Image: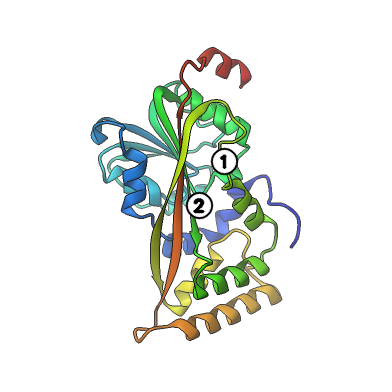
Amino acid sequence: MAGPPDPDGAARFTDRADDYTAHRPSYPDACIDAMLRGMGTPNMLAVADVGAGTGIMARLIAERGPLVVAIEPNAAMREKSVPHERVLWEDGTAEATGLRDGSVDLVVCAQAFHWFDASAAFAEFRRVLRPTGRLALVWNEVDATTEIGAGYREILDGLATDETPRVRYAAQEDPFAANDLFDDVRNESFPLEMRHTRDGLIGRALSASYAPKAGAGHAELVSRLGDLHAAHADGAGEVGLPYVTTVWMGEVAAGESMVRIRSER
């Protein structure tokens, strides 16, 4: 692989927005249940979806009743979002959301936290959360314990143009470990399957920021994924790509001083 991901992770998705919109997986209902559990009446909640992409997670949460502010720095991704009456879009980053102090009950980062400056992001999330607030970090990973999942990950990770897969996997080992702003940290995992045609499976891979978009690497990616699809396709010409959705959650630490958070920004 080449070097580490571009620090400006947002810009990397500008030419991936179409594939992202068409082929990225959703999130299971049980994941949304877990994030909202114990938070109170859903339609009284304010949620920030940080690194919202095209709004997949934002819309799922909004369907439950909360008002969601979707924070996304990439204009191409924002433009591909499907409007929802309870989702408001803002241009911002995890380190500078633009939200007011103590204005949200829940911050969610879905398939995005590995792009952030963790220390700065944690401080910003604590700043915008209410004292009873919660932070949820979510990842969808293709299930490598299955034959098709292992094959898919071997192809895509092996042809990656940089270290993004390694960075993403490492971020999930214990994303809350290096902070003291959140406690009661726990995680839950849920199964998910997405159905793909041959073109859909290839499009899913090309939505990744590190998938080669041209040259010999791109040609090899398309060829090998086509072979993988052919080996597993059902009578309808689709394959089921299995995922494990993991959500890490932490509650705002009791007695944490907002004065200190503001002074550290």
Q: In the displayed orientation, state which residue is furthest to the top.
A: 259
Question: Looking at the image, can residue 24 be seen?
Answer: no
- Residue at the location (53% across, 80% down)? 228
Tell me the kind of residue under disc 2: Ala
In the rendered image of this protein, does residue 249 appear above or below residue 17?
Answer: above
Q: Nearer the viewer, residue 221 or 231?
A: 231
Q: How many marks?
A: 2
SS label for mark 1? loop
- How far apart are the two marked residues, 1 and 2, measured between alpha carbons? 28 Å
Q: Secondary structure at mark 2?
A: helix
Circle 1 residue: 175
Residue 139 as seen in the image, left or right of residue 237: right
Q: Quadrant of the C terminus?
A: top right
In-front residue for pair 32/223: 32
Which amino acid does the dot numbered 1 rest on? Pro
Report the residue marked by disc 2: 76
